[in-house]
Amino acid sequence: MQQFGRPLLVACILSSLILTRPSVAVDLQPNDIVAPLPNKNHVMVSYYDTENSTLYKNGSAVSSKPYGSPVIDVPSVIVRALHTYAIGDLPAATYVQLPYGTVSPSGSLSSYAPSTGIGDVVLATAIWPYANRQTRTYFGVAGYLQVPTGAYSSNQVFNTGTNRYSYDLQMGYQQPIIGNLDGMVAVDTQWFGGNSQCAATCGSSTNVPLTQKPLTTTQLGPIYRINQTFTVGASYLYVAGGATAINNVYQNNVVNTQRFLLSGLAYTDIGRFSLQYGRDMGIQNGFIQTRVLAVRFMREF
């Protein structure tokens, strides 16, 4: 079996997280922190596409083979079914989400096989301990469970599934700044279960255990309601942590990434349309994300 080398580990971990990260709802849309009305059912369909290129190791670009001109494209379709309700007087919501997509390595990584299939199912529940619609002030807490249902082969470097459970706890706060301008801030931490069948991804000819430290994301930015139909927003995200160990050997690959997202929402009679675009501004370890594009449609039933 081909030996892939440990530097590719960063690529494999991030290629899995690229497809599954939208599942754990780290990248919030404008007004995601606003408490929903109870007893509603929604379905949201998303097209989510990311492109990653240059590999960085401890802040320096890696150009050695096979990283001369790497490209990893990850298009996916994500379906989410959501129900809102109340726990006592507190608004709450629960959803189940399933992605289906492809991890496509190209450029100097074109010799590695792509992966197509379902991603990891996510179950999520959110509750709002404080929600004041008159003052537009909200504080919410959400928990996520990611289940390893995605396509995974230990003999492949790139997979749409992660072959491990993960758990995420998120808190978000939103309030008015002035007029129709609101501000939001959210923090979440993701904990990872182990993957005991990590072979090609871990640069090994046999299965070895892969573990990962918690990963924390902080997101903040303004939200502006132009009118009853259109809302726009901008977000700055800082991601830290997530170092891995292979067979109990620390890999010294802490994630330290800064990103931005620009968002637009349109509330129409047939449903809500949304568009997001962003990219990494700086990265310490991993393939830099040169594009993230998300197009979503949500309808109430």
Image (cartoon, rainbow, N blue to C red):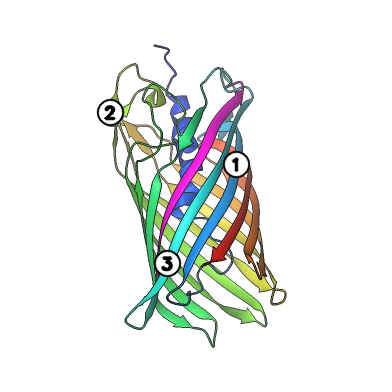
Q: How far apart are marks 1 and 2 (CA)?
A: 30 Å
In this figure, which residue is indicated by the disc labeled 3?
A: 83
The outermost residue toward the front is 301
**In this rendering, would 188 be left or right of 247?**
right
Name the residue at 53% across, 32% down.
103
Tell whether label 2 touches label 1 (CB within 8 Å).
no
Please report the bounds of the magenta region as a residue range.
Answer: 93-108
Residue 101 lies in magenta, yes or no? yes
Q: Badges 3 and 1: C-beta atoms under 8 Å apart?
A: no
Disc 2 is placed on an element classified as loop
Q: Which of 273 and 231 is in front in this view?
A: 273
The residue at which mark 2 appears reads as: 247
- Whichever of labels 1 and 2 marks the residue nearer the N terminus, that label is 1
Element carrying mark 1: strand
Amino acid of disc 3: His
Q: Which amino acid does label 2 sit on?
A: Asn
Mark nearer the viewer, 3 or 1: 3
Up-down: is 100 above or below 210?
Answer: below
Most foreground residue, 230 or 8: 230
**Which quarter of the image is occupied by the N terminus?**
top left
Residue under numbered circle 1? 50
Residue placed farthest to the right in the image? 226
Instruction: State the residue in front, 76 or 17.
Output: 76
Total marks placed: 3
Is residue 275 positioned above or below 175 on the image?
A: above
Q: Position of residue 254 (x, y in %)?
A: 43, 41
Q: Residue 217 lies in magenta, yes or no?
A: no
Amino acid at dot 1: Thr
- Residue at the image point whose x is 57% and y is 51% from the top: 46
Q: Is the magenta stretch mostly helix, strand or loop?
A: strand
Residue 267 visible in the current orientation: yes
- The answer to which image quadrant residue 66 occupies is top right
